[in-house]
């Protein structure tokens, strides 16, 4: 009978094959594993978005473009857009699993806080005294959790 009270990541962790000599997963092992996957995909996404931005400049401001005159900038931009969308599609289930997995330790809470910072990234676009009260409250809470965890903000 399936356990309906367990998150996707807990079920994934619980079904891993292990021998008797392998230590049990840490309490937030599933969240820590999700964080590793999240970090890899966010790095890929950042790189893809940066190169896509370069092609966008070429499409809209050809005078500032370093591309060869005969380069098909439009198709390169479309290819980069598809790459970004593919990465976002791979990132979605990981983000959902992070949000649905219960944190048991401060390290797990830090994973969730880092994800919240990623989702609410506009809160870090300006000086803290220039953002609205609710955004400031969220930003300060996320920063406090990341400091305590310790987890570096994305």
Image (cartoon, rainbow, N blue to C red):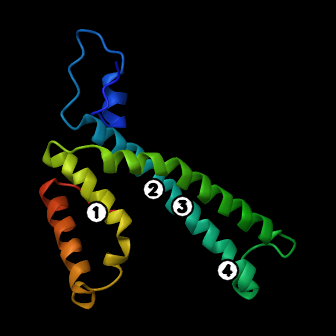
81 vs 6, left or right, is right
What is the spatial separation of the Cα atoms under label 2 and label 4, in whole angstroms? 22 Å
Q: Nearer the viewer, mark 2 or mark 3?
A: 2
Q: Secondary structure at mark 4?
A: helix
Q: Secondary structure at mark 3?
A: helix
Residue 57 tag number: 4
Residue 5 location (% of width, % of height): 27, 33
- Residue at point 18% right, 76% down? 137
Residue of label 1? 153
- Tell whether label 4 touches label 1 (CB within 8 Å): no
Q: Which residue is mark 2?
A: 42
**Gap in Å between the C-alphas at discs 1 and 3?**
18 Å
Q: CA distance from mark 1 to mark 4?
A: 29 Å
Mark 2–mark 3 distance (CA, rounded to whole Å): 9 Å
What's the distance in space between the residues labelled 1 and 2, CA to CA? 12 Å
Specify whether 30 is left or right of 137.
right
The residue beneath circle 3 is 47
Q: Earlier in the sequence, mark 2 or mark 3?
A: 2
- Which quadrant of the figure contains the N terminus? top left
Density class for disc 1 (Cα within 10 Å; few <14, some 14-19, many ≥20) is some
6 lies above or below 109: above
């Amino acid at each position: 009978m399936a356990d309906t009270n367990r998150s996707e990541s807990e079920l994934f962790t619980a079904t891993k094959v292990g021998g008797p000599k392998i230590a049990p997963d840490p309490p937030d092992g599933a969240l820590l594993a999700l964080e590793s996957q999240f970090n890899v995909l966010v790095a890929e996404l950042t790189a893809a978005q940066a190169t896509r931005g370069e092609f966008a400049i070429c499409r809209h401001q050809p005078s500032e473009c370093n591309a060869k005159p005969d380069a098909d900038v439009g198709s390169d931009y479309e290819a980069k857009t598809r790459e970004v969308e593919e990465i976002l599609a791979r990132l979605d289930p990981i983000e959902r699993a992070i949000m649905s997995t219960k944190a048991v330790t401060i390290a797990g809470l830090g994973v969730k806080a880092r994800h919240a910072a990623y989702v609410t990234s506009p809160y870090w676009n300006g000086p803290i005294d220039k953002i609205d009260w609710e955004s400031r409250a969220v930003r300060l809470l996320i920063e406090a959790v990341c400091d305590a965890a310790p987890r570096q903000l994305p």
